[in-house]
Amino acid sequence: MDSILSPPLPIAVSAPIALAYLFLAFLQCRTVRSGALRFLIFAVTIRFVVAEFHTFTFAASPFGVSYSALATIAVIGVGLLLIRRERLVDPALMPIIIYAVVIVLSAAINRVPMDAIEVLAKFGYLAIVMLAFVDACKDVGANRTLKMLLLPMSIPFVYQLMSLVLNISKMGENDGSQSFIGGFSHEAGFSIALACGLLVLCLIRDMRLSVRLISLAIGFAALVLANYRTTIIAMAPLIGMAVFVWLLQSFRPNQRWSLSILMPMLIAGMAAAFILPNQERFSDIATALDPDTELIRDPRSFTAEQRSVFSGRAYIWSRYIDSYSRGSPIQHLVGYGPESWSEEFELYAHNTAISTLYEYGIVGLVALIVLWGWQFRLALRSRHNIAIAGHLSFFILSMSTMPFWIVEGLLFYGILCGFSSYRLSQVTQSKQTHRRQRHSVRAT
């Protein structure tokens, strides 16, 4: 796994871009009356600017946490002041609260209360982004909210373009491949930042098909240049579903049945056209899908060659599971406590479920499944196919990295869950209106 940080862009390049985007965010906020939307614009802008200057912002502050963590806490504080008070009892918050209670319980039992603070702050960030997105949608509509977020979401794309122009890249430790990540610290966080922009693009309702497809192609090319295989694979359901829905909508209803048959074959062909020239990079997928492959097993049984499968993930997962299995009954129940992995392992688990099992035990894993299931059910009930595919993409991402551990991942999930919640409220309201109209017709 790559652990070396990326070389930063020259300050003469990165600083003017950051200042320009901060100024543009200020101008954007002057055009909207929604406090929640203004908050989201600045939250996204601040996060990407903070991530760009990681050589400074990731350093420890005098308060014992990084400047990046302080920025996240500040965003949470501002968000709490702006979101509507009734939103604090939103049913969509329930699974996040349950998960937070498990974190506190594990920290208390393992006597590491201070280690829970930063983790709780991350889930507070997730909740605030989700609730603010719902408020913004109620103020100005989902489509305008998403369109306004496109500008700050373009920040990592612009920084990547600068890294291409200046030929500044990060070299992969395993295969020597190049990752153009715009001066961000690591391709994982950067690729998920790009994924945030792609999510927003895919959820926008009224754009010309040609603009959508060109923008999506640029976004996918950016993901490929970022060279983080995990995110490329994870975003396939979202991108595939978006293309399918967009093309379906461009045809007359009586023609859609034939397109619905041809489109899956077309998307599969496009995927094959991408994978075949890069089959060495994706050969681990075939290995993992082989019925004879045992990914999770005694870590001592791995050969040197097998330890490199999935960039070492199978070996890492096996070590975490092995260490968890040797714990006490209480640790099997509530885990070893938040951030306890750093005392035992040099690398985080690269799998949200396995990491949760190790840190918070069976109780934590159940809480995580409830959280995922709860939010996915909102998307299913909203009947929005692109949002449903977005949840599937996030789940795939969670199985091979840890978006909950990265603020960019929390931003992605917060927007996705907020959209699902708002969309469901609109569907429910529409049904109620239709039911009232039907009753009134019967009464007359």
Image: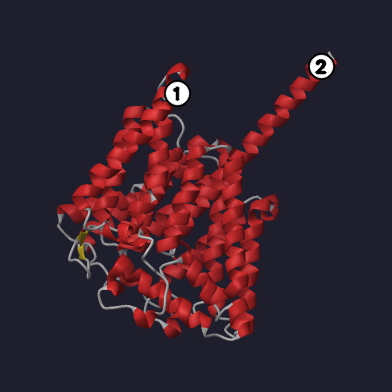
Residue 267, numbered label: none
The colour scheme is: secondary structure
Name the residue located 46 percent from the left edge and 69 percent from the top edge.
69
Q: Alpha-carbon neighbours of circle 1 within 10 Å: few (<14), some, or many (≥20)?
A: few
Would you place residue 148 above or below residue 227 in this image? Answer: above
Secondary structure beneath dot 2 equals helix
Q: Nearer the viewer, residue 313 or 100?
A: 313
Give the residue pinned by disc 2: 442
At x 35%, y 61%, the residue is 288
Residue placed under numbered mark 1 in the picture: 257
Observer able to see residue 22: no
Mark 1: which amino acid?
Trp
Q: Gap between marks 2 and 1, in whole Å? A: 35 Å
Q: Quadrant of the N terminus?
A: bottom left
For label 1, the SS is helix
In this rendered view, identify the residue nearer to me: 208 or 393: 393
